[in-house]
Amino acid sequence: MALFMRGWRNWQTRTFKVRVGDHTGSIPVLRTRPVILWPVLLFVMPAFANCFSANHLMRRLEAMEKQYFIPAAQGKRLIAKGIASLESVKKALNDGIIVVIAGTTNRYVAEELCGLVGCEFDGSGFYRGITVPAGTKMPTKDGTRDLVIERGRARRDLTIFDAAPMLGKGDLIFKGANALYLPTRTAGILLGTHSGGTVGCAKEAADRTGCRLMIPVGLEKTVAEPISAIAERCNRLTVGLHMFEVDGAAYTEIEALQDLCGAKAEFIAAGGVLGGEGGCYLQVAAEDLSPVDRLLAETREQPFRL
């Protein structure tokens, strides 16, 4: 292969009336100097080829995707931080009313929201129905109150039943869940009575006033069937727990990572021991994973305590 490309010459023997390359708009041709190609061949082309090699591309893809294990308590904290970052939540904190119905995940939500308005939150006993192993001794507590934040002022003397008549468009209600059907973000809430409980009151307020009902729920509560099918099965029994379905309102660790880091997460596995029970494996993709690494390092939580 020649290392030099000869320049253009005036070929007098051609029959063209003008010189080749002299037409207006044509590509200029080098006429006097040879074009030296060997530096390009020796240095530039191998480096260019390496950038697009299969191994290089694979390393680039792997650098943008990573798997993480998130314990249940850390998942609750992530969900709470994601919710606290939403503009609609910040607006309701300052200009409207937010009701956080007592629950284990909502305790983290209440802590984050109280932090935004500059007040302390004591989460002990902040739950209603709760699932524990048989034989577990539960601590005694006074009557349950929910958290109501009205235009930046936190109140612990009200419940959702007290606050529902005060709600309007732009206000928010947070209620935890017991089941999650991930494809439709539909949540199921177990009920001990036929009256609908706190979620029934919250759903009625949302339908009547236009306020928004959001369901913070961890991926640990994912079920294989649509909530409607499970609710139908539960609700035909006269004895036992019933289920209330809420469509499309679930907020999980997946939404939290999207809102906090701009990352796309996929739920790939779950479970563990020695504090890993209820944890989930997520495969996370992003242009830059360092914000995800920092966030997960900052949100490590001890196992949940009542």
Image (cartoon, rainbow, N blue to C red):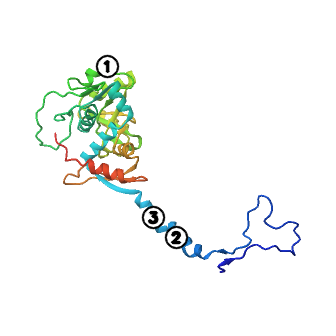
Q: Is residue 290 visible?
A: yes
Three-letter code, disc 3: Met
Q: Position of residue 128 (x, y in %)?
A: 21, 32
Any mark on residue 47, and which? 2
- Figure quadrant of residue 123: top left
Q: Mark 3 touching mark 2, by CB under 8 A?
A: no
Q: Which residue is identified by label 1?
A: 166
Provide the residue designation for mark 3.
58
Question: Closer to us: mark 2 or mark 1?
Answer: 2
Among the 4 quarters of the image, the one containing residue 244:
top left
Q: Residue at (27%, 37%) from the top-left corner?
A: 112
x and y, in percent, of residue 10 in the image: 81, 73
What is the quadrant of the N terminus in the image? bottom right
Image-based side of 80 in relation to 143, left or right: right
Query: Does label 2 or label 1 sit earlier along the sequence?
Result: 2
Instruction: Residue type at mark 1: give it.
Output: Met
Answer above or below: position of 261 versus 84.
below
Q: Could you tell me which residue is drawn at 89 percent across and 71 percent down?
A: 15
Mark whose residue sits in front, 3 or 2 = 2
Instruction: State the residue in front, 245 or 55.
Output: 55
Amino acid type assigned to the residue bearing label 2 in the image: Ala
Q: In the rendered structure, which disc, 1 or 3, sits on the residue that comes first in sequence?
A: 3
Q: Residues within 10 Å of mark 1 (few under 14, many from 20)?
A: some
Which secondary structure lies at badge 3?
helix
Q: Secondary structure at mark 1?
A: helix
